[in-house]
Amino acid sequence: MLSPAEGTPQAPTRVLVIDDEPQIVRALVINLKARRYEVDAAHDGATALRLAAARHPDVIVLDLGLPDMDGVEVIKGLRGWTRVPILVLSARHSSDEKVEALDAGADDYVTKPFGMDELLARLRAAVRRAEPAGGGDDEVLVETGTFTVDLAAKKVNRAGKDVRLTPTEWHLLEVLVRNSGRLVSQKQLLQEVWGPSYGTETNYLRVYMAQLRRKLEADPSHPEHFVTEPGMGYRFER
Amino acid sequence: MLSPAEGTPQAPTRVLVIDDEPQIVRALVINLKARRYEVDAAHDGATALRLAAARHPDVIVLDLGLPDMDGVEVIKGLRGWTRVPILVLSARHSSDEKVEALDAGADDYVTKPFGMDELLARLRAAVRRAEPAGGGDDEVLVETGTFTVDLAAKKVNRAGKDVRLTPTEWHLLEVLVRNSGRLVSQKQLLQEVWGPSYGTETNYLRVYMAQLRRKLEADPSHPEHFVTEPGMGYRFER
DNA sequence: TCGCCGCGTCAGGGTTGCGTCAAAGGCGCC
DNA sequence: GGCGCCTTTGACGCAACCCTGACGCGGCGA
């Protein structure tokens, strides 16, 4: 696993490294950048707090032994306004110190010397669990002049009232809306809604498209949003 | 800090301990119970997965060396349906093993022998960050015209009197309320309430939804808040 | 101008899914 | 060991949904 995020392309993960030992910072920066993280670095607590506020990192790696302030104070300073994951580095193996840092708000505690593989794995774990629970709740609200589709809640609202759709109606609507503005062929619609073994039963489409128009179009006989492309398919226009 | 939660009174934190060494289980159970955690224990992976589904712990402590299955498989089995924090215990110090467990979905990795103070601190950290982001859009109190749900206290009040719910009823209500306004599919409800191996037993839903409506709706035969979306799922509307 | 094809509309019938009730099984508690 | 509550399971009636066939209309080509 090279990149911090697998699968869908997305904004790179931003890491803030806080340590006063140049060689450690260098090693971390090199390893992180090689894995496509964006990295900022700070050598003291004051800079760290400023950078955290300015750059809004997705995860923070914090060495407790800083020249200007106590590491725990840095944690508390961060926790006052953010829940960003904090991964603590420390040369101290003492149990008390670990407990203090963790209870102050740190998410993990790694003692030096540490293995780079392990640190990176802990970093991935910290970033992963900070991700929002929902898979992709992007663009869930689609509005037209006469109605609104909420893809996440599976709701359609028209003139302040929720419209009741049957499962098949909703499924068809969902496919069309997710391809908003694009032409969707009859075959594709049939296969997505009725299953891969369908493809020619265009009468299904005619019936259900009529139901959608009757429930959602201002004038069902002159559809504005569910447009027929004769011989090809249908298109949803907002 | 004796109790796991400071400040507001709330439901106790539930921990699932998975280890095949009796003395470790005993030590953990004693220490956790002394700190007001609710503790379940399992000695093998199969029991662990079953208990996790049945009891819905707030955090899991998992020893990788189990008699019946690989610890990483247990992690994957859990991650298939839940994001509950998993704290891994292991006698193996190897970096590869740590990386594998963390990338499989573990939240933390502690090598044996471990200090009890440190383990408890890591446990607190895991539970803390799993808590819903305070001040955000999630509310602890959800009110409707006829009743009030207190998600933190696990209580439902109607006309000034607390309504008595069975564990399953409460669990179902909780899933619906946490997705307030959104449609929740029958499969998702079944898996969240009855466990990942369920998904088709919709008769359970029919029975328990009827119980909830009888206890909470003003007119159970004409539900306003627990809405059926035929063929799709159920929706809670306030 | 005629005929054909594709689309929209409507109504009926088979089937599925939901709500309800009742009773048996399981588990913990007294 | 008995009791009570919770969960599970089955049966039944009813409403809603999905499929199907028939018909009318308009556009396009012959």
Image (tube, coloured by chain):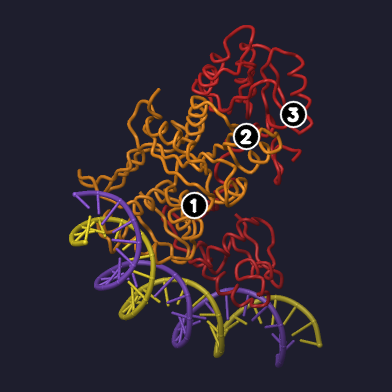
Chain colours: A red, B orange, C purple, D yellow
* Chain letter of the residue carrying label 3: A
**Which residue is rendered at x = 57% and y = 46% of the image?**
B66
Residue A113, x across and y down, in percent: 70, 21
Front position in the image: A72 or B3:
B3
Amino acid bearing label 2: Val
Q: Which residue is mark 3?
A: A32
Q: Residue B47: which disc?
A: 1
Q: Is residue A27 above or below residue B215?
A: above
Q: Secondary structure at mark 2?
A: helix
* Mark 1 vs mark 2, CA separation in Å: 30 Å
- Relative to B17, say whether A148 is above or below: below
Q: Position of residue B172 (x, y in %)?
A: 39, 53
Instruction: Name the residue nearer the viewer: A26 or A216.
Output: A26
Q: Is residue B213 left or right of residue A140?
A: left
Q: Classify B70 as above or below C26.
A: above
Q: What amino acid is found at the position of numbered circle 3 in the picture?
A: Leu
Residue A189, percent from left and from top: 64, 67
For this view, does A207 lie left or right of residue A17?
left
Residue B57, located in which quarter of the rendered image? top left
Q: Amino acid at mark 1?
A: Thr
Task: Determine whether label 2 and label 3 are within 8 Å by CB.
Answer: no
Task: Tell me which residue sits at (62%, 6%) in the image.
Answer: A68
Residue placed under numbered mark 2 in the picture: A127
Instruction: Provide the secondary structure element on which disc 3 rests.
Output: helix
Q: Nearer the viewer, residue A25 or A48?
A: A25
Question: Is label 3 in contact with label 1 (beta carbons under 8 Å)?
Answer: no
- Residue B227 is at least partly visible in this image: yes
Which badge, 2 or 3, comes first in the chain's sequence? 3
